[in-house]
Image (spheres, grey):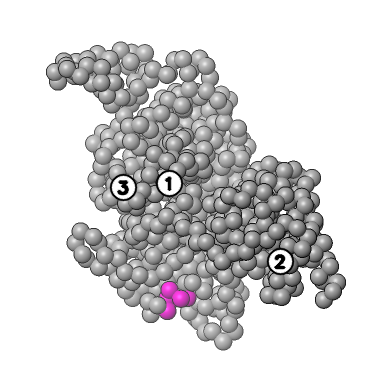
Amino acid sequence: MIDVNREGEVWVFAEQHGGTLEETPIELMSKARHLADTLGAKLGVLLLGDAVKDLSQRLIQFGADKVYLVEHPLLEAFQTNSYAKVILDLIHKHKPQIVLYGATVSGRDLAPRIASAAKAGLTADCTDLQIGNHEIAKTKEVHENLLFQIRPAFGGNIIATIINYDRWPQMATVREGVMPMPEPNVNHHGVIVTETAAVGQDDLPLEILEEHRRAKKVDLKAARLIVAGGAGVGSKENFKLIWDLANCLGGAPAATRPAVDLGFIDHDHQVGQTGTTVRPSLYIAVGISGAIQHQAGMAQSQKIVAINNDPDAPIFNVAHYKIVGDLNEVVPRMIKAIKEKSIKD
Amino acid sequence: MAYHCVVLVKQVPDTQRITGQVMNDDGTVNRAALPAIFNPEDLNALELALEIKDRFGGRVTVVTMGLPGATRVLRESLYRGADEAILVTDRRCAASDTLATSYILSCAVKKLDHDIVLCGRQAIDGDTAQVGPQLAEKLDLPQITYIEALETLSGEEITARRNVGNGWQRVKGKLPVLLTVVGDANAPRVAAAKQLMKYKKARTRLEIADEIRAMNPDAVEAEMAELIETRCEALEAKGLLIKHWDLDYLEADLAWCGRNGSPTKVHRIQSVVLAAKESKDVEPTEEGIAGMIGELIQDKIIA
């Protein structure tokens, strides 16, 4: 653990695999930039790997003031122990006040190992981060400018704001897709700080035998229009309605967790707390009751159309257009209306 | 080679099946609205340990930290085939965050032989997935997280396939090791009738004390203590006394337990209020739907 210090920087772990940056840490760069500006601190990113220096410039364009570059052949592939050791050394050397990670599989594997060794706090899967003050009820002592680590808990039924004021750094992982991807700014200037890695073969207790990473079948985060089906669609065959409506809008088909669990569509299409968080211009919810876990992933959509035969379905609470009716009739009518309108225009 | 497996399990509120208001008016969580269950992915971790025992022999020890009522998940583990179950309970564990929890659990695991330590990937109440990796660090063990298949186990060598989100990875490691297991890894077995009959009487000393006090409300303290002692000895002789360990027994450093040992604190908790939006009811007729599509086109929502 390091002492509370106001001079410390705000850090983001820039996760990369095979020379490709993960999106989630990039998404949180604009938020991290904002936090750093609020605190009057520098924004640093941690770039670990082998021959990854070329990625530094992009990270600077995304808002980094400093890129801590650590290159070593043993860091070529991500491994928990070696990466944790390097980052711990950097934390002890530079004493950042905040360290953020994407809540990817690697981020959620790495960050707790670092937190345990640093004896620091860590909040998982944050959906928002802010700077604020905390007053201790008993003593009226006020801790200023803390990192508010905001996350859903109890299956999305409550939102908790977590802080740590006595043991630093303040650390959090941030959920995929909850923060908009920043636009690169070619005029933003930053420096590359080259650090050496004190890692040896002992820091690699595992051997990676084989790895297969694939691009997602659908990029829901980038979709402007989304048509999502729930268990109410009834069957995999009937899910064709969702595909048809999505195709006719030029949008992406999506689903709730129950629809995915029933095998209607692949997990890559899942929206919600255990799937992707989306914020399209239009979200059409078909046969979706609107469990809180699903709403967590789509409530930020600009316009929401809900179709359900149950007038009391919770999805109607977040919908802008409510259609109570049989989806088997409503969806074909929508397709027809869209085709007619687009011909007219 | 036979293996000593230690499985960490947790009793959690069933956040997927909420039966009422989750928050009390005073802002605390209404636990009565949340029935307690065996954390789902911990069942996958237990199943993996039992499969290892079935194949190679050895022992499966299940440990939980929680209130005395959490003994239920320990009995459920025994019904499924665990050899021993241990409850870590102490008032001074209260308000532990993941860091303090992993410290306390590490003290317990250190008291046990362990070739393979298994955890579910995450618990459904917090969804943090932090305790597994933190425990691995405290025990100075390598961690293999997000395991979807144990491929081979031979001597001290283990190979496993991990789910890395957008794909998979096969890794090889050496025991001792800590594994976290995902829900897709296996189908947890149900309780076996024979073990259920045997272990349904398994109790912790705390439960025995409660039962005896309830049955003998008028007994004096010395008499009560003797009744409890006799009953516990009888259970122990049959292998039905579930151990409970407190922080003194664990020789835990109290500075790292409970509230003191927890760097994260709650600033605020809010119930999720789904704000009613300005909304329109659309008739499910051709005209109604055409009107809505027209509006969406006009608002440039649909191109």
Whole-percent x and y of residue A250?
A: 77, 65
Can you see residue A259? no
Q: Which residue is mark 3?
A: B95
Question: Magenta stretch containing residue A94, yes or no?
Answer: no
- Which class describes the residues within 10 Å of circle 2: few (<14), some (14-19), or many (20+)? some
- The residue located at (59%, 50%) in the rendering is A313
Magenta residue span = A33-37
Q: Amino acid at mark 3?
A: Ala
Q: Nearer the viewer, mark 3 or mark 1?
A: 1
In the figure, residue B204 lies in which quadrant?
A: top left
Q: Which mark is residue A35?
A: none
Badge 3 sits on which subunit? B
Whole-percent x and y of residue B265?
A: 33, 56
Q: Earlier in the sequence, mark 3 or mark 1?
A: 1
Callout 2: SS: helix
The answer to whether the residue labelled 3 contacts the one labelled 2, judged by CB atoms less than 8 Å apart, is no
Depth check: give the residue in front, A27 or A76.
A27
Depth check: give the residue in front, B155 or A311.
A311
Main secondary structure along the magenta-highlighted residues: helix
Badge 2 sits on which subunit? B
Whole-percent x and y of residue B152?
A: 61, 35
- The residue located at (82%, 71%) in the rendering is A342
Residues marked 3 and 1, same chain: yes
Q: Amino acid at mark 1?
A: Gln
Q: Which residue is mark 1?
A: B21
Whole-percent x and y of residue A42?
A: 42, 78
- The residue located at (46%, 76%) in the rendering is A34
Q: Quadrant of the C terminus of chain B?
A: bottom right
Callout 3: SS: loop
